[in-house]
Amino acid sequence: MNRKQLVRTIGNLLMVVAVVFILYKLYQYREAFFGVFNWKIGCVMLLSALFTAFTFVVMGVLYGSLVGRISGGKAPTGLTARIYCKSNLYKYIPGNVLQYVGRNQIAEFTKARHDQVVLASVIEVAAQATGALLVSLFLARGYVLDWFNRQNKTLIIGTVALGVMVVAAVLVILIRKKKKLMDELRGFLIRKNLLYMLGLLGFIVVTQIVNGGLFVWLMHCMVPDLPQTYWNNIAGVYCFAWLVGFITPGAPGGMGIREAMLSVLLTNVILPEMITAAIVLNRIVTICGDVIAFFISKLFARGTESGNRYTEVNI
């Protein structure tokens, strides 16, 4: 068995483990799901799942483009999207880091090096976190800041600082390890790529706003008399909760963390039992969207194949 076959085998094994965890979580949510489900909620959930899938497939293509820009090569869009979406399912395996490890399969099937793929992941994580923070502060600045003022500021600031230090440490290790990578990073930070990064950040901001809006729509279907004055706050709080779950290590797919944040932040706005039900339905949406994205990416990859080779596009 050669190296590529070994990487592919390990990836398939991780995929099986991820599917087991996904099915287990869906089984856990079954009672809460059937307790509140109706056709209106079903339509919102379907639309949300499809949008989630669309977002991840596009992010897979953009991530491949990012790797290509760093490595100075070309991006096989079908291949990178498939690996990105497949690796995305690994986040449900406890640890919340295997999705980033899985992306390194890209280095086995392209000319990019492993450290270049890792650097692309660091940049993408920073962009995702920045986009979610901007949207949450824009939509629910007063609500989030009020909650912040009532909490242990030292603990929160320390946690954020730790996250920033971890990202900075990864960058330092990567750059010190190879001077060539530092030169490549400098080469990446040119006007053309900075405009590309602004476009990437813009896409992330739009998807965060839409996801927040879909969550509000779901809440409205469950609580028809939900005052419109709360809609912006709920959407912003959702993005903030997503951000906290996203950056928390150890939580598979942010599970538990995102739900806890939504429960804490929305308790004064919505009845606790409605929050719990909405959180469960939203988690099901996320899981289904991730799975749909994986199958769409496989079809996309197959559509860009030519024989046994992937079509490469200039980036």
Image (cartoon, rainbow, N blue to C red):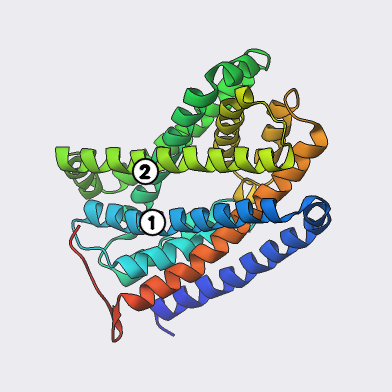
Give the image location of residue 205, x and y in percent: 41, 37
Q: Residue at x 39, y 77 (%)?
A: 4
Name the quadrant containing residue 17. bottom right
Front residue (pair 106, 293) = 293
Q: Is residue 90 visible?
A: no
Q: Are the residues tagged 2 and 1 within 8 Å (C-beta)?
A: yes
Classify mark 1: residues with Cα within 10 Å, few (<14), some (14-19) or many (20+).
Answer: some
Circle nearer the N terminus (2, 1): 1
For marks 2 and 1, give the CA distance.
9 Å
Element under disc 1: helix
As helix, strand or loop, the secondary structure at mark 2 comes to helix
Q: Quadrant of the C terminus?
A: bottom left
- Where in the figure is residue 217, as x and y percent of width and height? 61, 41
Where residue 288 appears, as percent x and y from the top left, is: 61, 60
Q: In the rendered structure, find residue 119 and report the number of the disc placed on it.
A: none
Residue sitting at x 69%, y 43%: 221
Amino acid type for the residue under numbered disc 1? Val
- Image quadrant where residue 305 sits: bottom left
Above-or-below relation of 122 to 4:
above
Residue 283 seen anywhere in this rendered image of the structure: yes
Q: Is residue 304 above or below residue 71?
A: below
Q: Residue at x 31, y 65 (%)?
A: 77
Q: Name the image quarter holding the N terminus.
A: bottom left
Name the image quarter holding residue 218: top right
According to the image, label 2 marks what residue? 203
x 49%, y 42%: residue: 210
Q: Amino acid at mark 2?
A: Phe
Of residues 50 and 120, the one drawn nearer to the viewer in this rendering: 50
Q: Which mark is residue 58?
A: 1
Percent coordinates x, y for residue 10 in the rendering: 52, 73
Q: Is residue 38 left or right of residue 124?
A: right
Neighbourhood count class around disc 2 (C-alpha, 10 Å): few under 14, some 14–19, many 20 upward: some
